[in-house]
Every structure is written in structure tokens, then in C-alpha cells.
Amino acid sequence: MSDVSLTVNGRNVKASVEDRTLLVHFLREHVGLTGTHVGCDTSQCGACIVHVDGKAVKSCTMLAAQASGSTVVTIEGLANGAELHPVQAAFKENHGLQCGFCTPGMIMSATDMIRRYPEGLDEATVRAELEGNICRCTGYHNIVKAILAASQAMSKAGKGKAKKAA
Amino acid sequence: MYSVNYHRASSVADAAKLLKSGDAKLLSGGMTLIPAMKTRLAAPSDLVDISRIAALAGVTVSGKTVTIGAATTHHDVATNAKLAKACPALTHLASHIGDPQVRHKGTIGGSIANNDPAADYPAAMLALDATIITNKRKVQASKFFTGLFETALKDGEIVTGVSFTAPAKAGYAKFPNPASRYAIAGVFAAKGKDGVRVAVTGAGENGVFRSKEMEAALAKKFEAPALDGIKLSASDMMGDLHASPEYRANLVAVMAKRAVAAANG
């Protein structure tokens, strides 16, 4: 067993878990945050993407024990109360989802992508950066539109605010 | 996942000690090892996490000498500004491994220690005539990669970094598997002070290899047309559902030309 201690969406979480526990299972079953999804369980689909210490990673391919001491942000940690994060708002506005299963991973991927490209994004870059996310409704077109819109909205809102939001 | 014991090493010496427990394996980014464990292709009893050892991470460029710590992620290699100046072919290579999330976790040390026959870094190490540094010794890349998933590493030996002299020119081109982004054929071509080296990944039946034939042609003239007419034998190439040996033999020549063009670009 491993004693893990991490910050999840600003809250300190301590637990004793089996060493083999994957971060995604820890988040869903121990912390009760089921917004992070298990899609393929083979690090292909990206439904499980969360941010660990500010970087997007696939939580199905990381042990909870590896994340101990880290700061984790999940899809539940993006909105500010009732106010959606700009990327969430852009997905809603642009209908960037169909069944919605891949959406949490898409949004976590998008917020990370926008953070890494503060100068802005173009369509080709967004499509290349979505390499690690699969949407089996094949709804990519509106997902790309939503990410481009969010990127624009966030750079307009100013670097300071965009940084905070990401 | 089956049951496993997790240990976090605080230093390389600590990791070496922990490696003696059971049938232990080193865990760095885990981007290959954890999926392999899920499918039981690997079944270590213990995992020794070396990814948080600060001394193992980072890129240093000092004059023409480049040193990269084993626990440096593909993302950190891809985005290192000094390395982009010293050896842009390597930052380009790192930026095309897997996907962004994999690049945030996967490390150069893990990639070369695993020596997947379709991994990108082994080709770069071989073409750059890199030195693989372990906790016990230094090994030339040409002696390090010994076959499919096989290296010169001995039990308890830990890759701590790599170093190489920045080449005058270098380029990398790969034809990725559209699903996994592993190379179906990848070629790293480098023109250094000791001549031209061309290393091929993804295609060889015994893993990464150098093409002496292409090196000889490029030594005369380091330009893509110098490779015109070179036909590699299909007998040493891998064949699988993605590409036949003949297809790969041709693809290697195409990628080699692109790599040289990129090096001159």
C-alpha cells in the first residue's frame, strides 16, 4: 500500500491505496470525481486527460503513487462556481461535443494546448495537438472550432487572466 | 493492473539499491512500461520510480557538447531553446514522439533503455555517435543498442544521461504509424566531424541500424540526390501488417532523402 497525498482541484487529498492504483481510478473511485473518463485504458484515446503539475497527462497511464506530492486539476476544477471556464464555454457555444464522452479529455487537452501557445493557435496546430484525443462521434470539426474560439477569447482577455484560467 | 510494489527513489544510488528488491524495474515516464504491464508483456514485482530525481533531468549545451539527463521528458527536449540551436533535428524528433500527453511524461532515458525497434531516439543516438552514460560507465551508442528491446545494460545498471557533439548538419524524417506514431521507417542523418552517419529505426529486423551504403554515398556529397539509385535489401527488414519488408526497404530510402533535405534546409 502507498500513502498518497496530493492536491486535487485545490483540495488536499490523502489516502492509502494499493500501489497498482492508476491515477484515473484514484480520482474516480477514491476522490469521487467521475468527470475524468476511462475510454481505452491504453493511453490512446485521451478521455482520461488531467493536468498534473500544470501539464496534461493521461491518468490511465500513471499510478496514483507517482502523482503523490503533485497538484492535479481535473475537468471539475476548471469552472469558477457557476461560471464556465472559457474553454468549456466555447465547447458549449460551438457545439464541440456529440455524445460527450471524450469531452472532459478534449477540454483538458485544449486548456493545456492554449497555455502552451499563448501567441494563439491555427487550425493545423489544433488538429496536430489533438493527436492524443479520440472522438468516436468523429465530431472533430466543432471541437477544433471551439478550441480556436477559446484561444482567441483567452488571448483577448489578457495574458494574466488567461494564465489564471488555465 | 496486477499487484506491484511502488518505490520512489531519491537518488541514483537509492534507485540502484531499490532495484535489488524482487524482480524490480525502473519506472521513469511509464509511457511504455505501464501499458506493457497492463497487458502482462512486462510483469515486474517492484517499480523504482526515478522520474523525480532532479539530477537526472535537464538539457545542457556547452559549446558543441550536448548532455541530456535520462529523466528529461520528450516535451522538455522538444522545447529546449539551446538544443534547438545546437541540434534542431533532435528537438524536431522529440516533438513528434507519441502525442502531447505522452511527451509530457515519456523520457529519453526510458526510450533508449527500452530500445523499441520502432522508437525514435535510438536512431538519433546512433547517428549522433552519442555516449550513453550509466551509473557505472559510459557506452558508445554503437555498442549500446544490441537488438530488439536489447541493450548493453547489465542488471542493476541505470541510464543517467546521454551526451554527444552537436553535428554540423542533421535531419530526421519518419513515416509514422498513423495510430501509434511509432516509426514504420525513420531515418536520422548526421554530418559530424568524423563523417556521415545514417541510422534507421522502425524498419530493421534487429532494431536500429546504420546504413553504410547510404553513409558512403552521402560522404561524397551530403545532398538528397546522392542517394538516388540506392536500393536497400529487403531481407533485413521487418515485415508486419503495417508494411512488408520490400515496402520498408523503399520507405527507408525515401525517408533518408527527406532527412538529408531537412538537414540541408
Image (cartoon, helix red, strand yellow):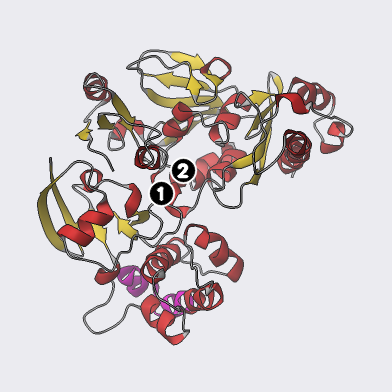
Q: Secondary structure at mark 1?
A: helix
Q: Is residue A23 left or right of residue A32?
A: right
- In this picture, which residue range is highlighted in magenta? A150-166
Residue shown at the point (27%, 76%) measured from the top left: A79
A94 magenta-colored: no
In the image, A34 versus B160, the foreground residue is A34
Q: Which residue is mark 1?
A: B104
On residue B74, the disc is 2
Alpha carbon of mark 1 to alpha carbon of mark 2: how far?
Answer: 7 Å
Figure check: A22 above or below A89: above
Residue A153's x, y, as percent?
A: 44, 80
Mark 2 neighbour class, 10 Å CA radius: few under 14, some 14 to 19, many 20 or more: many
Callout 1, which amino acid? His
Residues indicated by labels 1 and 2 sit on the same polypeptide chain:
yes
Callout 2, which amino acid? His
A159 magenta-colored: yes
Q: Chain of mark 1?
A: B
Residue B187's x, y, as percent?
A: 68, 35
Q: Secondary structure at mark 2?
A: helix
Q: Quadrant of the N terminus of chain A?
A: top left
